[in-house]
Image: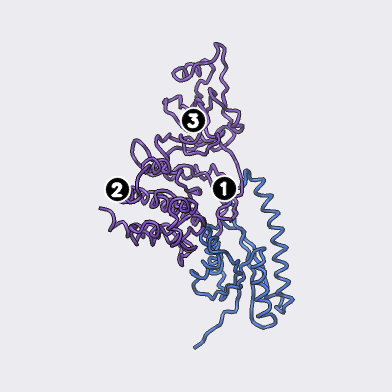
């Protein structure tokens, strides 16, 4: 059987501590091993109508947030490179999306880009928080298909 | 051609409803409603070539609003038709809500309410109306007035002095049927990727004319996290508990009135978010059927599985109802 193992890893991350733990986990586990490619994906959730009272406010927020997350993504990239990933095998991607479900948005990116492994951090929500607002990692575990999911505690 | 909104014309149009306080009275006429707090009794608002005579700001009991005066919500008369309307002007407000110790960011969204009004224009379980931009582009909502009580007042008035068991067998079946219709109405929103945003028992008005239960006030929005409908579901669960219990069953009340019930209650019997409300109603009222209690327990601290979609709640209630309704 000619089985080609998919060594492309997608880390879905934001600026949170749990996302950083996911990056560090991949860095520590696979850094220095050959054949793996990593993309750190950050999806900026497009705000709903009226969250900002006008477009100027929205643009200002987006610009500032983008600058902040670009810095964070660069930090993540550096962590992976420092751990032994070749520079050309680490990339970052930040996109703006309307996401009724962040889990769906992440999985849809994974489907498009065909990564074999999806890595997310676990926020550690209380039961009542999970009940009221849902859990991104929980939803990904329940609904992901055609990939392996690592949930980093 | 624009209509004539001269002082003379307005004086004639308003004559059936408004007596000017002095012979030389000059009407304030607004087609830009940005400064809504300046618009008051006897003023005129022009929207899409229709003049509205402003009566007063809305209050609780008339439109399901809270105690304080809402300066951006006006009762008005459409001077074309003579119908009473509720006019909701644009008020951008952002605040942090706290539910069960969890903070989340909320905001008012006139556009969301306008979208939903359009979506539900033929749906009997919602308030009706339309949106119209004023001269400055503010999305003003013009709503039909619903005459009737809030669900909270309805249940309180109906059950005054009544034993729970009598209420449960005599009134609750009809109440549950109406609640299921309201839950289906929320499902309709969810299927259209909209959330109500502020589901509570005083946001259902019981239309005196049609007897339909109708959702009101959909302008609240919040930055949702993963499940954009979880908070709505939580609201539906709270209303169901309130209806099944003939009011909220609070620990403080049990201490006063039914101390023995406290001995059988544990933490796992409480509402998952509100720790002072009982979810396991069967422990208080043993005749509550197991099928209904199972639904309620999805909103308790002992729930292993939560509802994360509204149809799941409705399916379970339908299953229960098929044996319960006569």
Instruction: Bin the neighbour count of mark 1 within 10 Å (Cα to Cα): few under 14, some 14-19, many 20 and up.
Output: some
* Picture colour for chain A: blue
SS for dot 3: strand
The residue lying at 57 percent from left, 33 percent from top is B71
- Tag 1 subunit: A
Estimate the x, y position of residue B247 in percent, counting from the top left: 42, 48
Mark 3 / mark 2, whichever is N-terminal: 3
Which residue is denoted by mark 3 in the rendering?
Answer: B75
Q: Is residue A70 visible?
A: yes
* B3 horizontally vs A62: left or right: left
- Whether A152 is drawn above or below B138: the answer is below
Nearer to us: label 2 or label 1 = 2
A7 or B303: nearer the eye? B303
- Tag 2 subunit: B
Which residue is denoted by mark 1 in the rendering?
Answer: A49
Instruction: Compute the Cα span from label 1 to label 3.
Output: 26 Å
Name the image quarter holding residue B136. Answer: top right
Per the rendering, the mark at residue B170 is: 2
Estimate the x, y position of residue A32 in percent, counting from the top left: 70, 82
Instruction: Bin the neighbour count of mark 3 within 10 Å (Cα to Cα): few under 14, some 14-19, many 20 and up.
Output: many
Q: Are marks 1 and 3 in contact (CB under 8 Å)?
A: no
Figure chain in purple: B
Nearer to us: label 3 or label 2 = 2
- Tag 3 subunit: B
B261 or B300: nearer the eye? B261
């Amino acid at each position: 059987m000619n089985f080609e193992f998919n060594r492309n890893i997608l880390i879905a991350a934001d600026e949170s501590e749990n996302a950083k733990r996911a990056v560090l986990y991949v860095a520590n586990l696979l850094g220095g091993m050959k054949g793996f490619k990593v993309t750190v994906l950050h999806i900026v959730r497009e705000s709903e109508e009226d969250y900002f009272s006008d477009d100027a406010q929205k643009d200002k927020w987006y610009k500032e947030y983008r600058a902040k997350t670009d810095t964070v993504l660069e930090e993540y990239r550096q962590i992976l490179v420092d751990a032994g990933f070749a520079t050309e095998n680490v990339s970052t991607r930040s996109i703006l999306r309307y996401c009724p479900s962040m889990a769906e948005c992440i999985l849809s990116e994974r489907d498009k880009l065909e990564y074999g492994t999806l890595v997310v951090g676990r926020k550690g929500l209380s039961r009542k928080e999970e009940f009221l607002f849902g859990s991104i990692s929980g939803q990904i575990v329940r609904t992901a298909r055609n990939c392996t999911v690592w949930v980093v505690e | 051609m624009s209509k004539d909104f001269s002082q003379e014309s307005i004086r004639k149009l308003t004559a059936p409803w408004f007596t000017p306080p002095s012979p030389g009275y000059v009407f304030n006429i607004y087609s830009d409603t940005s400064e809504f707090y300046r618009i008051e009794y006897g003023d005129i608002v022009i929207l899409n070539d229709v003049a509205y005579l402003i009566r007063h700001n809305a209050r609780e009991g008339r439109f399901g609003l809270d105690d304080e005066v809402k300066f951006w919500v006006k009762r008005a008369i459409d001077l074309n038709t003579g119908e009473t309307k509720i006019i909701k002007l644009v008020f951008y407000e952002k605040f942090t809500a706290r539910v069960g110790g969890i903070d989340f960011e909320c905001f008012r969204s006139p556009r969301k309410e306008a979208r939903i009004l359009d979506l539900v224009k033929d749906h009997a379980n919602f308030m009706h109306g339309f949106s119209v931009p004023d001269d400055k582009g503010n999305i003003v909502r013009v709503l039909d007035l619903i005459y009737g009580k809030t669900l909270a007042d309805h249940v309180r008035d109906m059950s005054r002095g009544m034993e729970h068991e009598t209420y449960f067998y005599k009134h609750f079946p009809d109440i549950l049927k109406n609640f299921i219709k309201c839950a289906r109405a929320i499902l309709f929103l969810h299927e259209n990727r909209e959330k109500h945003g502020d589901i509570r028992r005083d946001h259902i008005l019981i239309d005196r004319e049609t007897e339909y239960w109708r959702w009101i006030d959909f302008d609240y929005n919040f930055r949702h996290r993963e499940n954009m409908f979880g908070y709505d579901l939580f609201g539906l669960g709270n209303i169901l508990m309130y209806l099944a219990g003939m009011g909220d069953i609070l620990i403080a009340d049990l201490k006063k009135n039914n101390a023995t019930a406290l001995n059988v209650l544990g933490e796992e019997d409480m509402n998952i978010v509100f720790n002072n409300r009982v979810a396991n109603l069967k422990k208080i009222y043993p005749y509550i059927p197991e099928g209904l209690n199972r639904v309620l327990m999805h909103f308790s601290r002992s729930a292993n599985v939560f509802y994360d979609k509204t149809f799941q709640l409705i399916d379970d209630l339908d299953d229960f109802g098929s044996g319960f309704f006569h």
